[in-house]
Image (cartoon, coloured by chain):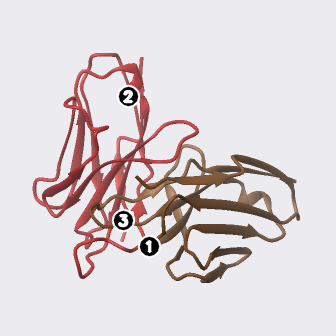
Amino acid sequence: SQELEQSPQSLIVQEGKNLTINCTSSKTLYGLYWYKQKYGEGLIFLMMLQKGGEEKSHEKITAKLDEKKQQSSLHITASQPSHAGIYLCGAGPRSGTYKYIFGTGTRLKVLA
Amino acid sequence: DTGVSQDPRHKITKRGQNVTFRCDPISEHNRLYWYRQTLGQGPEFLTYFQNEAQLEKSRLLSDRFSAERPKGSFSTLEIQRTEQGDSAMYLCASIERLAGQVPTGELFFGEGSRLTVL
């Protein structure tokens, strides 16, 4: 079955620093989703990528999906304390299943 | 549109008791998911509904777990004879009606129902 591996598992950065979170799939991705979660709360949608080489940005967050569609990166520029939380990558349903799967998450802390 | 609503947000129960969680999806969404999330892990798929039909269930959904969506609107997840290992956040998500059989868009998540089994 398909699995998503995220790295790093946790990250502590100083406010203003840039950072990158990676998500690697064991199989070709047919839709890659990035979500943010604050502790004890639900997931907030950030971005969806579907095409190899696609790149999307929202405010200071940029996500890319590589050409082979097996790896994605999330880059935050000039981090702020409001960026703190858990970032999760998710993969859309493949043939034969309706389920979305998720990585184990990257815990980000931004020091003011 | 008030988003996906889950109730209760928190539930503390004693081992062996039954608990039920409710999810109200976004009104025009006919597809609904239940996930379970434990500390330090990503959400794990439990089950999927299209309208009132339960189309997929995970092996995680033991016979103590049952989910329903009787009228294709709200859904309930019941856990019977709770065990300490059931302690987790139970997340509901919905997705809008799309052409074709397999959903391909963004899942909208509720705030979750946190279960603690003592």
In the displayed structure, A59 sits above or below A11; it is below
Pick the residue in front: A112 or B37. B37
Q: Which tag, 1 or 3, sits closer to the chain's start? A: 1
Q: Are marks 1 and 3 in contact (CB under 8 Å)?
A: yes
For the residues labelled 1 and 3, the Cα–Cα distance comes to 7 Å
Q: Which residue is mark 1?
A: A30
Q: Quadrant of the C terminus of chain B?
A: top left
Q: Is residue A82 left or right of residue A4?
A: right
Same-chain check, marks 1 and 3: yes
Kind of residue sitting beneath label 2:
Asp
Chain A, chosen colour in render: brown
Residue A16, quarter of the rendered image: bottom right
Q: Secondary structure at mark 1?
A: loop
Residue B60, quarter of the rendered image: top left
In the displayed structure, B65 sits above or below B101; it is above
User: Which chain contains the residue that carries disc 1?
Assistant: A
Residue A22, quarter of the rendered image: bottom right
Residue B101: image tag: none
Q: Which residue is mark 2?
A: B86
Kind of residue sitting beneath label 3:
Pro
Q: Quadrant of the N terminus of chain B?
A: bottom left
- Circle 3 residues within 10 Å: few <14, some 14–19, many ≥20: some
Chain B, chosen colour in render: red
At x 49%, y 54%, the residue is: A102
Relative image position of residue A48 (x, y in whole percent): 52, 74
Q: Which residue is mark 3?
A: A93
Pick the residue in front: A37 or B53. B53
For the residues labelled 2 and 1, the Cα–Cα distance comes to 32 Å
At x 60%, y 60%, the residue is: A24
Pick the residue in front: A67 or A43. A67
